[in-house]
Amino acid sequence: MANVTFSSNRIKKDVTVYATAGDCSTLLALAKTHKMPVDFECENGECGSCALQVTILSGKEPMGVHLTEKEKSVLRLAGKITKKQIEECEITDLPPPWRLACQFIVRNEDILVKF
């Protein structure tokens, strides 16, 4: 199980929910299930409206990360991540500071999600 903490000025206080390890649902699906007011439009990684900051809280080395090609393109065009950050992610398997909620699959690690 992973603890996912949602934090935003759009909610009264931070909310922590549990995500089942091995579930292939996206972070957006988890947010919708728990009625978190995360913005979204297309739900397929093309519009970028669901961009949010994800921070690993587990205190251990983050699990390998795989940005989809859509995420790379959309987050770069939105100015959320740089080409250099994308290259570093691919080399080091460390997560970038921004992700698309509709593309991010929650893993077995605690995260803080700011939106």
Image: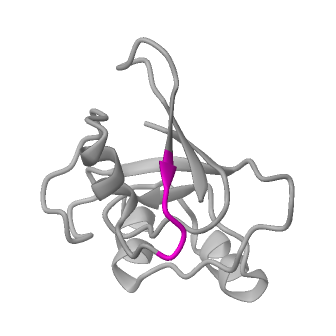
The quarter of the image holding the C terminus is top left
Question: Which residue lies at the image location 26% right of the left edge and 50% below the top edge?
Answer: 49
Magenta-colored span: 18-22
Q: Residue furthest top?
A: 12
Q: Nearer the viewer, residue 50 or 56?
A: 56
Q: Nearer the viewer, residue 29 or 86?
A: 29
Magenta: main secondary structure equals loop
Question: Which residue lies at the image location 48% right of the left edge and 56% below the top edge?
Answer: 19
Question: Which residue lies at the image location 78% right of the left edge and 82% below the top edge?
Answer: 92
Q: How many marks?
A: 0
- Counting from the top left corner in percent of width and height, residue 52 is at 45, 47
- Counting from the top left corner in percent of width and height, residue 41 is at 13, 53
Q: Residue furthest left?
A: 42
Does 31 sit left or right of 42 as displayed?
Answer: right
Q: Quadrant of residue 46?
A: bottom left
- Counting from the top left corner in percent of width and height, residue 1 is at 59, 59
